[in-house]
Structures are given as C-alpha cells and as structure tokens.
Amino acid sequence: MLSGADEIYLAVGATDLRKGIDGLAIMIQEHFALDPFSKKHFVFCNRSKDKLKILEWAGTGFWLHYFRLEKGSFKWPDGKSEAISIDSRQFRWLLDGLTLDEQAAHPYIKERLIV
C-alpha cells in the first residue's frame, strides 16, 4: 500500500481525526519529537478504532491518506500519547485486524542462504 518509508510510526491511543495535515504534523513534531518531513509514515487512529489517517511527506508536500473500515475495528494499541515504530509486516497485520505481536503468524526468516 505505502512505499518508500524508512519507518512506520503509530500514534498509540486515540487521535482526534478532525485534525488535518498541519494539526497532525504539529503533533508529530511537538508531542513525539519526530520530524514530519522525514521519510516516515505516521499513522493515527480514532477513538472507535475504525478509521485511520496516515501522514506522509512527499518531498514537495504532504499526503494525507484516510482509511475507513465498513465493519469491525482495528486492534489498535492503547496507552498514553506516544509513537511506536513498527515494520511494514506489522502494519499489514494491523490492517487485516490482527494484533501487532501476532503469535500465530509465521516467523520472519532472516537467513538468506539456500542449502
């Protein structure tokens, strides 16, 4: 879905999704002490856990992606306002309705040797 990001950050807990690009960028900069102009994707979720906004810097401007589930909710991590880094695999799990530390998933293979 999203490409070119060095990292993906989730804003833990609920975010007021009435915020637009400027409000989310300020939140990234001031609350999380991260750079909204970096090659990172910043993902936010509403209180009902059925909507996401993703802020992405494209070099000349921001993209603001919006996703709404028609049924169900995301297994979004609760907690205090913080940003956690996840990989693209965990992000796909989240979009598919799984938890970030899905125990039933196949382990990621790091070895690159054919025997």
Image (cartoon, helix red, strand yellow):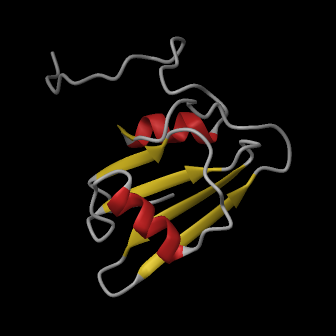
Q: Residue at x 28, y 54 (%)?
A: 33
What x and y, as percent, mark residue 53? Answer: 59, 60
Q: Is residue 22 above or below residue 56?
A: below
Query: In the current view of this chain or complex, which residue is farthest to the bottom?
Result: 60
Choose between 110 and 50: the one closer to the eye: 50
Q: Is residue 8 left or right of residue 105?
A: left
Which quarter of the picture shows residue 86? top left
Q: Position of residue 114 (x, y in %)?
A: 17, 22
The image quadrant where one finds the C terminus is top left
**What's the residue at 53%, 30% (across, down)?**
79
> Front-most of 25 and 85?
25
> Residue farthest to the top?
103
Q: Is residue 82 left or right of residue 53?
A: left
Residue appearing at x 22%, y 24% in the figure: 110
Q: Residue 4: image x %, image y %? A: 32, 62
In the rendered image, the vertical position of residue 49 relative to residue 42, given as above or below: above
Residue 89: name its quadrant: top left
- The answer to whether 85 is drawn above or below residue 31 in the figure is above
* 31 relative to 73, above or below: below
Residue displayed at 50% across by 53% down = 43
Report the number of numbered marks. Answer: 0
